[in-house]
Image: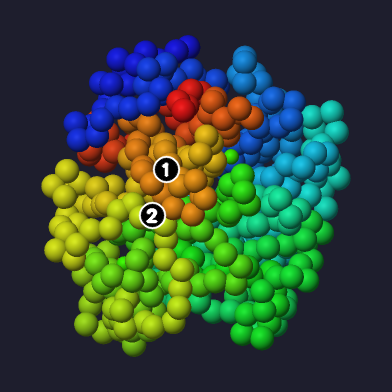
Amino acid sequence: MRIPALVLAAALTATLPLSASAAESGFRVVTTGLDGPYEITLGPDGFICTTEKSGLRVLRIDPKTGEKHVAATIPDAVHTSQDGVLGMALRLPHVFLAYTYDSDPGPALERRTKIVRFTSVDGQLREPVDVIAGLPGGTDHQSARLVLGPDSKLYYTIGDQGANQFSQMCQPIEAQRLPVAADDRSAYLGKVLRLNLDGSIPADNPVLNGVRSHVYTYGHRNAQGLVFGPTGILYSSEQGPKTDDEVNVIMRGKNYGWPHVAGYRDDKAYVYGNWSAAPDCADLDYSDLVIPPSVPQTTESSWQPGFVPPIRTFHTVPSSYDFTDEKCAEDEQWYICWPTVAPASLDYARGSLLMPALKDGTVHRLRLSHDGTRVTSAEPLFRTVNRYRDTAVSPDGKTVYVATDSVGRTRDADGKPTDALANPGSILEFKLGS
Ligand SMILES: [Ca+2]
Ligand SMILES: [Ca+2]
Ligand SMILES: [Ca+2]
């Protein structure tokens, strides 16, 4: 089924132009009925391999027919919201999966994350071997993007677990806390990890605060996107708070600033309100808009350690910005209207980064400078009412597959919150122009 460009055009928001070849050729719906696709990857056989976050499975999909084959069900995986069967990296015959499991042998549910290596035999994933277990796990800000580097190391993102907000407002953010021993996995929140394929600590990982561990970089909030460019530069995309989703160049041993800095150290529309340090934290009502007097606040510029600023933000706004857009007033779904777009992944194609987003119904194309260190322009490739989760790119860079969330909230054609998704739980195909 091909959705004509006119239908896409009708779904446009008035403020952003329809652009690029996706709109000219329309989408082809490859398959539907997926249960929370999180990572889609093209295998060397041309099939799309996908994890199902909530379906707790791995599927192989024929991109021509959309036919699905179950490659594995993961019986010990658990799912409530942002947890489940998440990241995946292929190096056939091996398939590496990251998923949430229950580490408590009794009736309690103690969420942790593990990375498991399977061996693919006739399209089935067999012989699971734990690469690493006991990593932090929860239901918010899991990040959980897994990639294999050109150096044959595994890179894995772990978010701040949603600390310091909503029901976890009294949990401190630990993105700046570094391990005090090599096996101190409790300090792996808000980090990018680098592991040998057997889960051991690479001998050339950075020594941070006197300790060499799996921690490669720190100071991250929710880095759901991670990809290597063709010259070996590692990029991340990260979800910001009310402002300043980030695209970063990830460099060994560096600090990326969270929670002291969102985006650039510019004191624009962000201060770090540390709810967990309020003496009366348990008695407070959490608010995204107002920080109560008992919650300590620090400005970005008052935090002086060195950190690596992003190469692009979505979007930085002045402190006078009104975060209560009328379009999102009903049920106070303000976050849908905020200047953040909620990047869900990151991929590389044709001199660009492709960044699918959950809130503004598009895949953003970020053109890179020749040396890959700067973003020279960014444009949305189309607008539909979907939450775009992850992409997979054909070897020639021209065909892009994009997976959509099965459920969740995004902006409708008028920019208002909706959970009526146009293509829930699907994989769509579009062509990328030069
Ligand atoms: Ca992918
Ligand atoms: Ca940052
Ligand atoms: Ca800032």
Q: Quadrant of ligand 1?
A: top right
How would you rate the neighbour count of disc 1 (Cα within 10 Å): few for under 14, some for 14-19, many for 20 or more?
many
Q: Are marks 1 and 2 in contact (CB under 8 Å)?
A: yes
How would you rate the neighbour count of disc 2 (Cα within 10 Å): few for under 14, some for 14-19, many for 20 or more?
many
Left/right of residue 92 with respect to residue 40 in the rendered view: right
Instruction: Using the rendered view, name the quadrant where residue 194 is placed.
Output: bottom right
Rendering coords of residue 69 (x, y %): 70, 25
Mark 1: secondary structure:
strand
Q: In percent of the image, x 54 and y 26: which residue is there?
A: 398
Given residues 19 and 40, the one toward you in this image is: 19
Residue 6, compared with residue 32, is above or below; it is above
Give the residue pinned by disc 2: 312
Q: How many marks?
A: 2
- In the drawing, what numbered circle is on residue 366? 1
Mark 2: secondary structure:
strand
Given residues 300 and 181, the one toward you in this image is: 300
Question: From this viewpoint, is residue 372 visible?
Answer: yes
